[in-house]
Image (cartoon, helix red, strand yellow):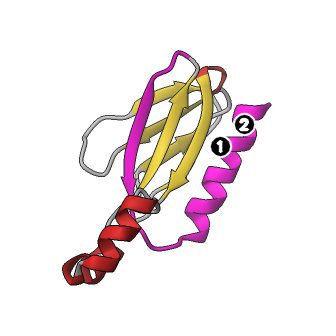
Amino acid sequence: MENEALVLDEKGYPLIKIWTDHVEIKAIDYSEFRTFKYSNIKDIEHYDPNNNWWTKLYMLTSLTAQIFSKNDPWVLKIILKNRGNWTYKTSPKQNSEFSQTIRLLKMKVTE
C-alpha cells in the first residue's frame, strides 16, 4: 500500500497531491487529476504571464489594463522532458503553503 499523500487544497490554486514517486494535479476548472512522475518532469515554473515588455507597454498606455491587470491569474507550468507542457491557472495572491509546495516539488524533481 502506498504512503499517504501530502495535499494542497487552497482556494484559487490547483489541487495538488504529492506522493513519493509522482504528483497529481487537478486544475481549478477541470474535474480529473493529471499524474506526473518526477522522473518525467524537466522543470516547474510559477510566474506572472503579464510580466513581459509588451504587456508593460500596454499597461502604460491603457487605463483599463492598469485597473484590471492586478486580478489576472498567474500560471503554474509543468515542463516535461518529452517537450510537453501543462499549464494551470493560479491565484495572483501570494500563499505560503502553495510556495512551500512548489519548492518541495522542485526538490523532488531534482533528486
Residue 44 relative to residue 57: left or right = right
Position of residue 4 measured from the top left corner of the image (x, y, whole percent): 61, 39
Tell me, yes or no, if residue 107 can be seen here. Answer: yes
* Label 1: which secondary element: helix
Work out whether residue 90 or residue 15 is closer to the camera in this orientation and state it. 90
- Residue to which mark 2 is pinned: 108
Residue placed at 30% from the left, 81% from the top? 66
Q: Amino acid at mark 2?
A: Lys
Real-space CA distance between mark 1 and mark 2, rounded to the nearest whole angstrom:
5 Å
Work out whether residue 39 or residue 47 is closer to the camera in this orientation and state it. 47
47 inside magenta stretch: no
- Residue to which mark 1 is pinned: 105
Q: Amino acid at mark 1?
A: Leu
Work out whether residue 48 or residue 97 is closer to the camera in this orientation and state it. 48
Residue 45 relative to residue 111: left or right = left
Q: Which mark is residue 27?
A: none
How many other residues sit within 10 Å of disc 1, few (<14), some (14-19) or many (≥20)?
some
Position of residue 67 measured from the top left corner of the image (x, y, whole percent): 26, 84
Which quarter of the figure is the N terminus placed in? Answer: top right
Question: Is 62 placed above or below 44 here?
Answer: below
Which quarter of the figure is the C terminus placed in? Answer: top right
The region drawn magenta spans 82-111
Position of residue 97 measured from the top left corner of the image (x, y, whole percent): 59, 65
